[in-house]
Each structure stands twice: as C-alpha cells, then as structure tokens.
Amino acid sequence: MSTQREVGKTDPNQHPRMTKKTKKSIFKHKHMLPYWLILPTLLLIGLLTIVPLGYSIYVSFQDFDTFGNPAGFTGSNYADVLTSGTYWNSMGITFAYTFGVVAIEMFLGLVLALLVSKDSKVMGYLRWVLIIPMMVSPLVVGIIFRLMLNADMGIANYMLSAIGLPEINFLGTSLNAFLSIMLVDIWQWTPMCFLIILAGLQSLPQDPYEAARLDGASKLQVLRDITLPLLKPIIVVALVIRTMDALRMFDQVFVLTQGGPGRATEVISFLMYRVAMRFSDFGYAAAGLFILLVFTILLSYIMVRTLNRNQKEGGV
Amino acid sequence: MKRLFVGTCYALSLSLVLAACGSGDDLSEETGAEGEEAPDSISVAMVAGQESAAMRPIIAEFEEETGIEIEWNEFDYDTLYERIFNDLQSGSGTYDVIFADDPWMPMFAGGGYLTPLDEFDYEIDEDFMESSRALTTWPPSEGPRMPDIDPEEEPRHYGIPQVGNVQLLFWRKDILGDEAPETWEDAAAMLEEHEDETDYGFVPRGARGNAVATNFNAFMWSHNGDFFDDDWNVTVNDSEVHEALNRYTELAETGPSGVANYGADEVGRAMSQGDTLMAIVWPVWAETMENEEESEVVGDIGYGLVPRSEDGEHAPQIGNWVFAIPEASENRRAAFDFIEWASSEEIQLQMAQNGGLPTRESVLLNEELNEEMPYLEAVHEGLENAEIRPRTPSYSEVEETIGTYLNQVVAGEMSEEDALENAASDIEDIMESAGHYDTE
Amino acid sequence: MENAKTGMKAKRLRGEIIRYITLFGICLIVLFPIYWMIITSFKPAGELFASDQTFFPQNFTLQYYIDPIDGVVSSGSPFIGFFLNSMIVASVSMIICLVIGSLAAYSLARFELRINKNDRLSFAILTARMLPPIVVIVPMYLIMQSLGLLNTHWAMIIVYTGFNLPFVVWMMKAFFQEIPPDLEESAMVDGDSRMKAFYKIVLPLAAPGLVATSIFTLILTWNEFLFAMFLLNSADMMTLPPGIATYITQYETNWGELTAAATLAV
C-alpha cells in the first residue's frame, strides 16, 4: 500500500485528465475486459430505455379514440403539440422553473459544502442534518408544505403575522404559487447538490492545496483557482442530473397546486400526465414528451460539452 | 453520432431478444387459467378512504359464506382510475371487481370494457335511488344522448351503485337558524346578516380542475344553466351560467383569501374549525363535524339541500360509487355474486352503520340509523334532487377545461366573461375533435 | 508579531462564529418542515387547522401510531408490509446498481473504448435518466407483462436499477477520474490483476463517492411513487409511497395518519 501511495505523490501536479496519455499507451491493446465491465449496464439500460422509447415514438404517431384505443396512424400529434398554446405555456414554465431552481440549488449546495467541509464531529452531524430533506418522499414533502403554506390556516402565515409581517397568499395567486413550488424544490433538492459536491470535495487530492498555501494564496484564490476547477467534473454531474430531474418534475405540482391557479404551475410532465392518463390521448402525450426529451438531450449535451471543453482548456 | 447509433441498435436487439423469450412463457400460463368454476379468490380494486373503511370489516362474512377469498386492494383516487383504466384497456383481467366513480362510467361502459349485468339475469332493484340507478346505464337511460350514439339502442346496466355520495349544504344552525336557506338569495342575505360572527361566510372549493368545477356545477344547474343543450351544443356561455358564476363569485368573496387552492379537505377543515358559516361539503365530513376530538362545531351544523335560484330547481351534484365487473375478468360469476351480496339491503345497512353512505332508499330512511346519523336524511333528499354530470366519456377533459378557467376567476386573474367564453370555445373543440358530433 | 498573531486568531474565531451561526440558521430552516411533520402526527386532528397554531401539541396523542396496528384507520394499509416491501426493493436494487454501475463507470473512466469516442457512450447512458417517467410507464407495463414479472418485486428492482444506473455510472465515473491511475498501475506492476487492483485500491479511495451514491440510490428508490403504483397491483406487494398516498382521499386528507406513516418511513 505505502509504495503505491508514494507513486501518486511523486508527481504532485498531476491532474486527472493529464494521465490520459499514459493510460492510453499502457492499456490500448488490452483484451475485452472493459467491454465486459460495461455490458450489464448497457443491457439493462437498453431494455429499460430504448424499448420503451421506441414504443413511445411509435405511439406518438398514432391516433387514439375517446376510449384510448389506437385508431390508425397520423402525423398530426406533433403538429397539434407544436401549435398548442397550452403546450408552449407549460414549456416556458418548466424551463423557467428549471433554470431558477438549479441555479439556486447549485449555488447554495456549493456554499453549504464549503461551510461544512472541515472535518470535525459537529460537522459530521451537520452533514446528516442537511441531507434530511432529500430523504422524505417528494409526495410527503408536497403534503407538508401544503399544510404549512395554507394561506388562512397554515403555520407560515401564522408566523409571518406573529412577527408583524404581511401575510402571503402562497398558493392562491399565479406568481406566488410558482415561487412556492420553486421554494419546495429548493428545500428538498439543495441537499442533493450539497452532498454530491461535498463528496467531491472530500476526495480531492491535497497536494495542490499545500502548494497554494506555500505560495500564500488567499482563500478566495484557492477556491477559484484550485477547488472549483478540480471539482468541475463533479459539478457537471450534479448540474446535469438536477437539470434533468427538474425538467421532469411532477410530484410537487401534483400535490400542491394541481397546476393552478389557472395554468400558472402546469409543468410539462403534469400537463402530459393529465392528457395521457385522464384524457387517454396517449399519442398527443407521447409526442409532447418526445419533444421535451429532445430539448432535454440538447440542453444536457450542450452543458456537458461546454463544461468539459472549458475544463480541458483550464486543466492542461 | 454513428457510434451512438450502433450501440443503441446493439442494446435494442438484445433487449428485444429478452422480451421475446419472456412472452413465450406467458402464453402457456394464460391458457391454463380459464374456466368459470368458483375461484379461490377474487380481486377488488377499491378507493382508499371512508368508502373502503365502511365495507372492509364486512367482507369477512362473504368469505365465510362462500369460501371465496377477497383480495381487497386500495388505491388513492387518481391511482385507482389509472390502474383500472390500464387494466381494462390492456384486457389483462387483473381485477374481478372494480369500484368506479360515476363520471368514469361512460368511459368504461361506453368503451365496452365492462360486463353488462343482464348476462347474469340481474334486474336492478327499485329500492336503489333513481338517480343512482341511472348512473349505471349505458347508453344513458335519461337525458340527451350524444349525437354519435344510436338513439334507439336499449340501455343496459353495467354496475350496481353502492355509495350514495351527493353534495350537501353544511351550515351553522346555531348562528343561521335551523332552516337551510331555500335559495341563493336567502343564503346571501343570511351571510350578510351574520357577517361578523365568524371569520368567513361561504367557503368555495376553488382549486383548479375537478374541485372548482364540481363546486360550481351546483350553482350552474340550479340557475338552469348546463354544459350542453339537448343537441349537445355547448351552452356554458349562456346568460344563465353567467348569472350563476356571478352568484358564485359574490359568495366566494365572503370566503378566505387562499381559496384558489382550496380542495375538499381545506373546505371541510375550515367548516369543522368553526370559522365558516356555510359551504358545499361531501357528506362523509358529517362524521368529522360530529366528532368531539376533531371538531369545534359538534351539534352546530345543519345538513341540507344545496340552495336553488329564484326560478330554478335544487341541483346538488351526484357523486356515487359503482361496483362493476371488467369484461376481461376470469371470475365474472363470483364477482357478480360478490357485488350482489355487497349491495343487498342487509349489507348496505351494516355499511351505513360503519359510516358509509348507502344507495338504497330503505337504508337511507331507516329510522334507527337516522337517529345516529342525522345527515342520512339530507343525503336522501340530495339524491332525490341530484343532477348528473354530462354522460360523455370526454367529461374529464371538459371538467378540466372549465375548472381551469373558473379557478382563474376565483384567483381574481380572469374576468367572468372571458372565462366562460374561453371555456365554451375550448369545450366545443374537445367535443369536436373527439368526434362526438359525427353521426353515423 | 504577537499582536498580528492574536489578531489573526480573533479574526479566525470570528469567522468560525459566523460560520456556526449561519449553519445553525440553515439547520433551522431545513428542519422546520420535518419538525412540523412530526408534530402534526402527534396532534389531534382538531388542532391542525386551529386559528391559534401551536408549536407543540396541546393534547399529545399517539392515536395515529397505534390505530394502524389495530386496523381502525380509514385506510386498510398494512404499514409494516409496505415497509418490508420497500426495504427489499430498495436495498436489492441499490446493491445491484452499485455493483454493475461502478464496473461500468470504471470501464468508462479508465479505458478508451472505441464505442465511447468523445464520451458518446457515457452520454447515451445518461439519456436514460432524461426520459420523463410518464413516457416509459405504459411500455414498461407491457414489457413486465410479457416477462411475466408484473406485480412482483423483481419488476420494481429491475426498473429502479435501470433508472438509477445512469446516475451511479456518472457519479462513480467522476470519482474514479479523480483518482490518479498510477496507483493501480503500480499495483499491477507488482503482479495484481486489474480487477484486483480495482478492488483493493480504487474502490477504497472512492469510498466517499460510493457512500454518497448509495445514499442517493437508496433514497430515490425508497421514495419512488409512479412506477410502484403502476407495476404493482395488489396491496401485499406495494411499497411505502403508494401506501402513504392512500391517506389522501378524494374528500379529505388524514393528516395524522399520513404524517405518522411518513415519520416512520423516514
């Protein structure tokens, strides 16, 4: 063990990405091992993604009668979706919501992770406390907030008025309902960003920090020049995963507002859930969700590419 | 991108192979389980809540009598619909008995997914309330049929009504007096007179979709308005409906500020906390109102008919639950025996004693029962006057549409005129594209 | 010199105090809804929406914890059964996920696979998580039906494993990439096989990542609602979230029972 660790230390400035060359030269001609390693994953994901996805695309070109029976092929589902004001309204809400919550959650998650990154007993307990919200089922979270945010009988307004602040009609007006949904999401999912970033912080190599301390760099400089660049792969993962999850968010809206008031919180998954499960228009719903999927893939692809490219430039 | 594609195809083909292997087994299984002899068990899809709680303790009797075990599967309301519909549509026959809310019936029966009960030579008992009986038929036995349905077709019964739910007016009789307001005008006058005695006057159920639409139906119908005329032309922008909406928003102003997100639960709580003079509430809440532990208003609540307009009829909305048998069930005979047993007078009486709402007139008017449960008389009166939602499989979409616009009115974000005009044109589109105007 | 040092110390101390106060405040915000949930489960229903809200139940009741045992609740949910079902499904799928997911992640992090040029394969794996569940739910039902797995725990385990795999692969890949490859290489020079080096050296170093990832998969599985609802059609197979959902009925929400169940579930 000890000799191996030393090998790592002999080259303190080594960045993960830079090892790519050595790696290539040594393992290029190795047997099929890497393929065997990845095969089970591909099989499962193939079964659970590609087949359903293929089926959905097939469905999206089908017409359905009132009773949910397929009634021939049609291209009009996509045209209907793309020309529907309701659909684009929901798209707008979904993306506004996603950008809002992801930005805030990533920022708060990073700040929190830095605040508790020091190793001590208290911090160890704090970490557990901070990830509690994530452990509660989103359904239950929605319900608890519904109880607390009730404009007339809830504890939130009771506390506001107790300290002399005006009461807020949390779920009763369009803007407030939208912000309340965001608030619930931020409460529940900041811990996820926090935990991912914290795990990243903990497995960072220590050497660059020692070098920086010797150079007398300020905390902010260390953060900007060492921590953030090193954390980038982890941050990308957190960012992409959160974005994807936020884009398909469903539970909070389902429990808290049912998309109301009006259509103010009717995110895409909720709209399409109603269309498919209630109105039995599976073709329309499949088309609408497929378009969302295309947007999601594009967005994540751009995110991954941009951030990875920056990192390569910065890292080398 | 090409590599991605190759990888995709690779995984796709593998998973298809897997799926193909699996489906082979399935066939042999299915053919083995045919037959109409008495099964060991039948499976029931049930809604969670009071309906189930009132019936669950009694099913053991059936199990003892027949030796057939009942698998009692409870789901929440939305999930129940999805599970049943998915099961019916895929024809997998998972459930032998389903418990359906009445607006689902046109969808289930109209889609040919249910077993008509005349196959068991069943004739529905006249003891069931007339409005409840009407709900179980398809094509509709009363009211106009949609243009795409054969007007001559003989209606058949597809289920037995089991739970006699109907909208009631709850009011504070200790403040407003023992008599229910006869008309909306009376109600408004009462509310004004006693304005300062509680926090809120009338609490509307203003949440989006089903909630506000259901709440408003009682106003619309009692003002002689409706969704459709006899030829299924959309009429929600008629002057009667405008008048009804006007009345509704006027009363809603006496309610709490957050009503645009009030569902049945919030309305019931507001009532049981003693903050409220009057509301349209489901009868199951009566038990809560009379429960010392949960209520501030024990003995203070009157239960009665939802008011009418000056020149209209009382029109509370019916919301019954119906037992039905999927066409794909393999134990239809046993399923039928079960629902016939469950809806018998004796069992409905037991169910009512457990806090359930019966559909049989003899049980609703049972004197002993009425002493314990003062609201049953009001339920009976409600069912006698009840109005049924339009009998079309597209109703849930229609309801969602009008419920969205009405919700915006309640939130103060849309004018009444705009809401009804928009609703009318959207509903017309829905009916048009569903093909209900196509006559064959 | 001395002064500067104490000055530094004071400054650092002040920093620490601010840090702890901030963290304390954050913890309050984080914990309050949880606290409210727990408190609600001990309050008699009459107090829930009373015009005078109290931060502690005035009449403490255990009713909502005891009732489900006697079966006198509005919902017939056998809570313990749900709990066990959730345990089985969540833990088995987590283990499978971690095992096959880390292998794949290691492969992607360390080897230049020909099918993974420019990380394309990694990205393709990720797309599995982008699918809105509603898209896959009906086809998934059909697949499970044809495999004869409908209404079994295996169906849930397969689905949850598949849907958390992309997440596990990406997380673990990022962690593996942080570990310098020289470590395993030198172990291999010493005669270990690659798998042994992976097991002996890489996995222990990636432990924080493994822990974080397993927590996530466990939580996501524990709380999943939609698939559980669709693929399980009988009460004795059901997991917790659909069970908890039965406390929200069409007419009213049984707050006490619901929050009691939710408290136990956490």
Image (cartoon, coloured by chain):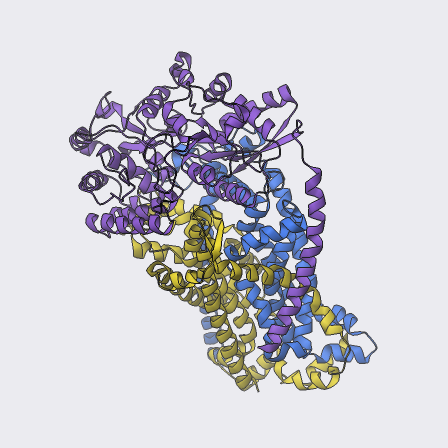
Chain colours: A yellow, B purple, C blue
Q: State the image coordinates of residue B101 (x, y, percent, origin top left).
A: 44, 35
Judging depth in this view, the residue of B134 and B438 nearest the camera is B438
Relative to B420, is B226 above or below? above
Closest to the observer, A150 or A57: A57
**Depth check, front residue: C170 or C230:** C230
Q: Residue at x 65, y 50 (%)?
A: C146
Quarter of the rendering containing residue C207? bottom right
Query: From where the camera sits, is residue B239 visible?
Result: yes
In-front residue for pair C211/C221: C221
Q: Is residue A110 left or right of residue B414?
A: right
The residue most toward the right is C191
Q: Is residue B301 left or right of residue C25?
A: left
Return the x and y of residue A169 as percentages of the image width and height: 29, 50
Whether B85 is drawn above or below A115: the answer is above
Residue B161 placement: quadrant: top left
Q: Which residue is at a point 28% across and 37% down the rendered structure image?
A: B230
- Horizontal side of A176 relative to C105 (left or right) equals left
Residue C114, given in percent of the width and then of the height, sits at 67, 79
Q: Is residue A211 depicted above or below C24 in this figure?
A: below
Q: Residue at x 58, y 84 (%)?
A: A211
Q: Residue at x 29, y 37 (%)?
A: B217
The answer to whether one can see residue A150 in this image is no
Extreme residue toward the top, this view:
B367
